[in-house]
């Protein structure tokens, strides 16, 4: 296969959840630039309208899709509408999620201080919605005998992380298990399931702490071997790789993009 074919995703139909900001928006930008037909979904209608209009004004094929991924019936309906309109769903980026709060090294983050209801909310958003999203595309991708499922996990799902909350670590560790389990089930159908495990990335998650709180940025960056906080652009190359023919023998992988943090 020639170089141009390895990374060719032109005319792929791609769904990105949580696509109106941060990491998800970065996925939408690179996939649209590479020629995919991107269905950008998000619960934030204002951001979705603004960012999809911006990408369309730049000449890209982007469709906004208001979607609450916690609603299983809405997920099923969204997938059905995409397949009805386009005849296929080639790739889904399961990205929507939330932060979990403070790790035990910070005041209020110890296990005895943890709020059970908050724990349940984080698990529901970060783990249950991944399961629901995988379930929603399962029959379609098996029937068409091709596809890519790419999940945004976290380096906190691959190793312990004292600066992350119990709920966040638990939810992302569960996501790692879901990716590996689904990869085995989907492999006979030529559907690849992989995860991207970001380290500290500047987004609006957890109220944009890494973006807006210089104290937190300073405390975080000292533990990153590359000496900086990541940006959504740092994930674009891997997103394109996993959506493209170049990743044809990769499945069940959780690939870290964390400036070397998981190696420490």
Image (cartoon, grey):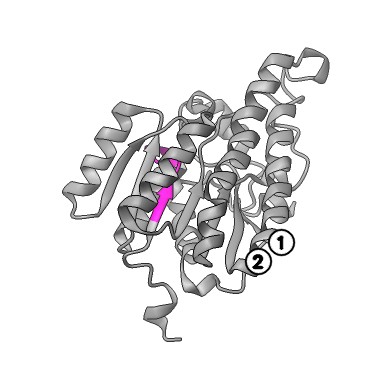
> Which of the pair 140/15 is nearer the observer?
140
Question: How far from the left and from the top, in percent, is residue 55?
Answer: 24, 47
**Residue 192: numbered disc:** none
Residue 18 part of the magenta-drawn span? yes
* Residue in the image at 28% along x and 39% along y: 51
* Residue in the image at 65% along x and 36% along y: 127
Tell me how many marks there are. Answer: 2
Residue 72 part of the magenta-drawn span? no
Residue 53 in which image quadrant: top left
Name the residue tied to disc 1.
184
Question: Would you say the residues marked 2 and 1 are in contact, meaning their CB atoms lie under 8 Å apart?
Answer: yes
**Rendered view: 127 above or below 100:** below
Kindly tell me whether residue 165 is visible in this rendering: no
* Residue in the image at 56% along x and 61% along y: 142
Question: How far from the left and from the top, in percent, is residue 210?
Answer: 52, 32
C-alpha distance separating marks 2 and 1:
5 Å
**Residue sitting at the far bottom:** 1
> Which of the pair 168/77 is nearer the observer?
77
Name the residue tied to disc 2.
187
* Residue in the image at 66% along x and 18% along y: 118
Residue extent of the magenta highlight? 14-22
Element type at mark 2: helix
**Rendered view: 35 above or below 3:** above
**Rendered view: 40 above or below 215:** below
Element type at mark 1: helix
Query: Callout 2: 10 Å neighbours few (<14), some, many (20+)?
Result: some
Query: Callout 1: 10 Å neighbours few (<14), some, many (20+)?
Result: some
Question: How far from the left and from the top, in percent, is residue 132?
Answer: 59, 39
> Which of the pair 232/73 is nearer the observer?
73
Question: How far from the left and from the top, in percent, is residue 152?
Answer: 56, 46
């Amino acid at each position: 296969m020639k170089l141009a074919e390895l990374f060719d995703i032109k005319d792929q139909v791609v769904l990105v959840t949580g696509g109106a900001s941060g990491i998800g928006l970065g996925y939408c930008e690179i996939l649209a630039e590479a020629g995919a037909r991107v269905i950008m979904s998000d619960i934030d209608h204002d951001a979705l309208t603004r960012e999809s209009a911006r990408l369309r004004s730049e000449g890209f094929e982007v469709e906004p899709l208001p979607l609450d991924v916690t609603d299983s019936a809405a997920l099923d309906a969204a997938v059905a509408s995409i397949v009805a309109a386009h005849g296929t769903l080639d790739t889904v980026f399961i990205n929507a999620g939330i932060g979990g709060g403070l790790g035990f090294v910070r005041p209020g983050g110890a296990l005895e201080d943890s709020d059970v209801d908050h724990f349940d909310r984080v698990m529901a958003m970060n783990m249950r919605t991944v399961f629901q999203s995988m379930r929603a595309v399962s029959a379609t991708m098996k029937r068409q005998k091709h596809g890519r499922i790419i999940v945004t996990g976290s380096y906190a799902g691959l190793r312990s992380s004292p600066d992350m909350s119990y709920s966040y670590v638990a939810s992302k560790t569960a996501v790692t298990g879901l990716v590996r389990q689904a990869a085995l089930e989907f492999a006979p159908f030529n559907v690849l399931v992989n995860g991207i495990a970001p380290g500290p990335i500047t987004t609006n998650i957890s109220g944009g702490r890494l973006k807006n709180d210089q104290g937190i940025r300073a405390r975080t960056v000292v533990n990153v071997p590359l000496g900086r906080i990541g940006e959504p652009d740092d994930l674009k190359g891997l997103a394109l790789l996993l959506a493209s023919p170049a990743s044809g023998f990769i499945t069940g992988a959780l690939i870290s993009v964390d400036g070397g943090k998981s190696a420490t």
